[in-house]
Image (spheres, grey):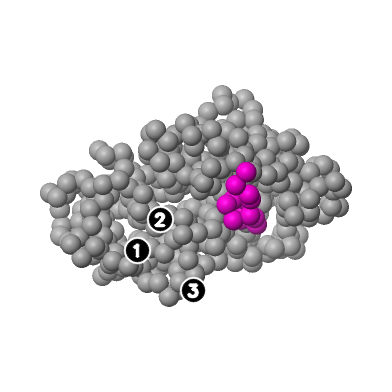
């Protein structure tokens, strides 16, 4: 009976684990890491060496921050963007992308935004149009700024460094007192009990606290859990194992369709399985209205993608991915991170320099392990084994959101 608690609680704990890693006060400030309540940006695009967040994008500089909203609002300052695409994604502790700050709602000259908790009164002396109500007091701000070639990195970093926060409270106790004894099941339920007690459950998410109480796992019952019988411990261990297996089973496209995507990404509501699945494979996903993520696990013949084969992905003239900002196709190994390759190329898209069009102005991308005989221009290198793709469309057009646009499948060419 405790298995639903695993699906329900996994996203919360994965968010808190990420907070623990990225805001550790004892670690040396580095790539995306540093003190709580401040932004800490990447100094370069992400590569196969970066392992903080699964399925990252290499088209962007990331800048992370974690804040705790106390009695006073937290100020979010956005500097002038000079036409650069950016977005600051606001996620609650349960991984819901409840608001985005970016080109669509912030003037080009920049502005200040104010973060308050849903239960707090509207502060005085602040423009209510610049107030964001937050479902949980712990908020993860994941910023993204478009970056071009190496020469553009300093400019992108300068913008990201100008995005600043003021007024955060301290790290919550459920992060500071994170349990990591090596017993995965016991640690899971111990951390869940403490987190739910401190973080709470927003009205936009399912609330399984009654199930916790029915299983004699009430919020704040950590000591009782530690004193529980061997039978109870074994039951929780089995529930944890079965729940994690269920999530893992659903991170793969079970329909074997060439592409899968959802217009509901980032806004989970009471879909606890989808929330958990994305937390495992793509934690920090933006809402589909900002960025649409289409995933390819299989080719046109429903065979799993594997670097032992060569593939082409062809977009006809006039039928490029419908995105008003930009689009790119990223490739990931089965560990859900970028795969090392001789080009250091982890994605290819409309901003890739030197792409070659066909005579009919269509575009054919070559996705394979070995360097194509035609050269590197349209090559997205693959590992020698299993992999998958994510096609990101930033500011997707309505024809994509409505399902009118059909993505072309990957066509296998031959075996290596």
Report x, y in % for residue 206: 68, 64
The one of 38 and 179 positioned closer to us in this rendering: 38
Q: Are marks 1 and 2 in contact (CB under 8 Å)?
A: yes
Q: Residues within 10 Å of mark 3 (few under 14, many from 20)?
A: few
Marks 3 and 2, how far apart at CA: 18 Å
Q: Earlier in the sequence, mark 1 or mark 2?
A: 1
Q: Quadrant of the N terminus?
A: bottom right
Q: Secondary structure at mark 3?
A: loop
Marks 1 and 3, how far apart at CA: 16 Å
Q: Label for residue 320?
A: 1
Asked if one can make out residue 182 in the rendered structure from this viewpoint, the answer is no
Residue position marked by numbered label 2 in the rendering:
327
Q: Which residues are magenta?
A: 97-109
Residue position marked by numbered label 3 in the rendering:
402
Q: Earlier in the sequence, mark 1 or mark 3?
A: 1
Q: Residues within 10 Å of mark 1 (few under 14, many from 20)?
A: some
Name the residue at the bottom extreme: 404
Q: Residues within 10 Å of mark 2 (few under 14, many from 20)?
A: many
The relative height of residue 216 versus residue 402 in the rendered view (above or below) is: above
Marks 1 and 2, how far apart at CA: 9 Å
Q: Earlier in the sequence, mark 3 or mark 2?
A: 2
């Amino acid at each position: 009976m405790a298995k639903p608690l695993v699906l329900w609680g996994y996203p919360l704990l994965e968010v808190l684990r990420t907070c623990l890693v990225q805001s550790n006060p004892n670690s040396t400030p580095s790539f995306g890491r540093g003190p709580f309540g401040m932004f800490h940006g990447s100094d370069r695009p992400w590569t196969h060496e970066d392992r903080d967040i699964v399925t990252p994008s290499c088209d962007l500089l990331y800048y992370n921050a974690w804040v705790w909203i106390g009695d006073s609002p937290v100020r979010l300052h956005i500097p002038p963007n000079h036409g650069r695409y950016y977005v600051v994604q606001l996620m609650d502790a349960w991984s819901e992308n409840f608001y985005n700050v970016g080109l669509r709602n912030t003037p080009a000259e920049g502005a200040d935004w104010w973060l308050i908790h849903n239960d707090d009164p509207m502060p005085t002396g602040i423009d209510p149009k610049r107030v964001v109500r937050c479902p949980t007091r712990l908020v993860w701000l994941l910023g993204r700024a478009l970056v071009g070639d190496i020469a553009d990195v300093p400019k992108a970093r300068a913008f990201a460094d100008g995005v600043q926060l003021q007024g955060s409270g301290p790290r919550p106790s459920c992060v500071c007192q994170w349990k990591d004894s090596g017993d995965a099941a016991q640690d899971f339920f111990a951390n869940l009990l403490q987190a739910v007690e401190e973080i709470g459950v927003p009205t936009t998410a399912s609330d399984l606290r009654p199930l916790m109480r029915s299983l004699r796992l009430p919020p704040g019952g950590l000591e009782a859990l530690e004193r529980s019988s061997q039978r109870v411990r074994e039951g929780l261990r089995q529930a944890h194992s079965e729940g994690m297996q269920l999530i893992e089973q659903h991170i793969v496209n079970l329909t074997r369709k060439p592409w899968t995507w959802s217009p509901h990404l980032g806004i989970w509501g009471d879909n606890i399985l989808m929330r958990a699945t994305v937390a495992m494979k793509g934690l920090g996903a933006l809402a589909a209205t900002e960025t649409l993520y289409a995933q390819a696990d299989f080719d046109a013949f429903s065979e799993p993608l594997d670097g032992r084969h060569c593939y082409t992905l062809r977009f006809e003239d006039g039928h490029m991915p419908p995105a008003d900002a930009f689009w790119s196709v990223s490739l990931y190994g089965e560990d859900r991170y970028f795969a090392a390759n001789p080009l250091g190329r982890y994605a290819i898209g409309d901003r890739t320099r030197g792409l070659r069009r066909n005579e009919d102005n269509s575009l054919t991308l070559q996705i394979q392990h070995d360097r194509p005989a035609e050269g590197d221009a349209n090559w997205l290198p693959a590992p020698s084994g299993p992999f998958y793709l994510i096609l990101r469309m930033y500011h997707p057009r309505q024809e994509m959101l409505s399902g009118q646009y059909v993505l072309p499948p990957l066509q296998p060419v031959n075996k290596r």
